[in-house]
Image (cartoon, rainbow, N blue to C red):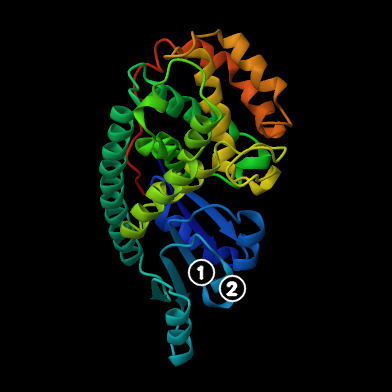
Amino acid sequence: MLKNNIALISKNTDNIKILKDIITNLEANIYTYDSIEDLKQKTPHMEMDAVFCYYEELGNISDVVNLNNVFLIDSDFNEEHKKIVYENSIYEYLFLPINSMDVLHRLAIINQQKLERFNNNSACISVLTQLVNIKDGDNNGHLVRMRNIVGLFLEELLKHDDYKHRLSESLCYEITQASLLHDIGKMVIPDHILHKTGSLTFEEFDSMRQHTDIGHQILSTTYNKFASNNIIKLAIDIAQSHHERWNGNGYPQNLKGEDIPLNARIVAICDVYDSIISSNSYKSSSTHEHALESIILESGMRFDPNLVNVFKNIGDSIKQEKQSRFTKMRTYHKPTI
């Protein structure tokens, strides 16, 4: 079950306890911080679905990204408070003493809105994925298998200190869904190039390479019309950057190292792994062992070496499950608070 992330911000432990007691029975990941600055330092990349912040701990909230539905808490709200709420796009304010039913009601509204976005996003991703499948002739299930490998990979990354504060269950779900669109730019690549059985000429390969920028353009246009769709937002980076290389010799931007978006680095490994173990019009399939060895050999050159070290940990899981689990979509539950 996907859980939402709720941040509670106060240096006063009694304040934290009051809020925890109210929401303790909800299906949610609860994080506590002393201040907005504390949140920025500990979990700068984590998306919060709701933030309860006592006024004295507010600080410069406008510097914090990925904060949704911020509730400012104080005993009285004067014109200064209202100005802060307006300027920082804070969702609402709550008066002290806190009314538990008021908090739960507002969280229920947030959850309903998120479920509606979830359903709309899923429908949008499904349509786009089917278009990619039809164009690319993906009859052997590459997109589905790769999506599931990405899911396993992210589950493992959540266990590691270097990544668990940059990821959350909901973000992992979104990256997994977004990976389905990594090759959406191939929709406009000519069929005689896309389905060619022999080696590509230099001109044909140059045309094929353009699918990364084309994918970026398609998804950016889509995102401009569905700005609340975080999956599309993530897919933009994945589509454009999944052929970048850790050493800077990739394309289309010759990005290097950490400059390559994390979600694109993750998808790049999974994409290559499944491409190696799969057959297509111009090559036969290879073994799991050969695919894993190939990725390890490219560590530090093509792939992020830290990610490769983690990917090795799920090698046995991939091998065991690729026959049964990877032939169909993994089941993901709708998010809930």
User: Image height check: is 215 above or below 324?
Assistant: below
| Separation of residues labelled 1 and 2 (CA atoms) | 7 Å
Q: Viewer-proximal residue, 231 or 217? A: 217
Residue, x 63% and y 38% (percent of image)?
250
The percent position of residue 121, horizontal first and vertical second, equals: 31, 46
Amino acid found under the numbered disc labelled 2: Glu
Q: Residue at x 70, y 25 (%)?
A: 298
- Residue 20 lies, in percent from the top left, at 47, 56
Q: Which mark is residue 57?
A: 2
Task: Identify the residue position indicated by label 1 in the image.
Answer: 53
In what element is the residue under mark 1? strand
| Mark 1 and mark 2 residues within 8 Å of each other at the beta carbon | yes
- Classify mark 1: residues with Cα within 10 Å, few (<14), some (14-19) or many (20+): many
- Classify 79 as above or below 138: below
Please state which of residues 193 and 335 is positioned toward the viewer in this rendering: 193
The number of discs equals: 2
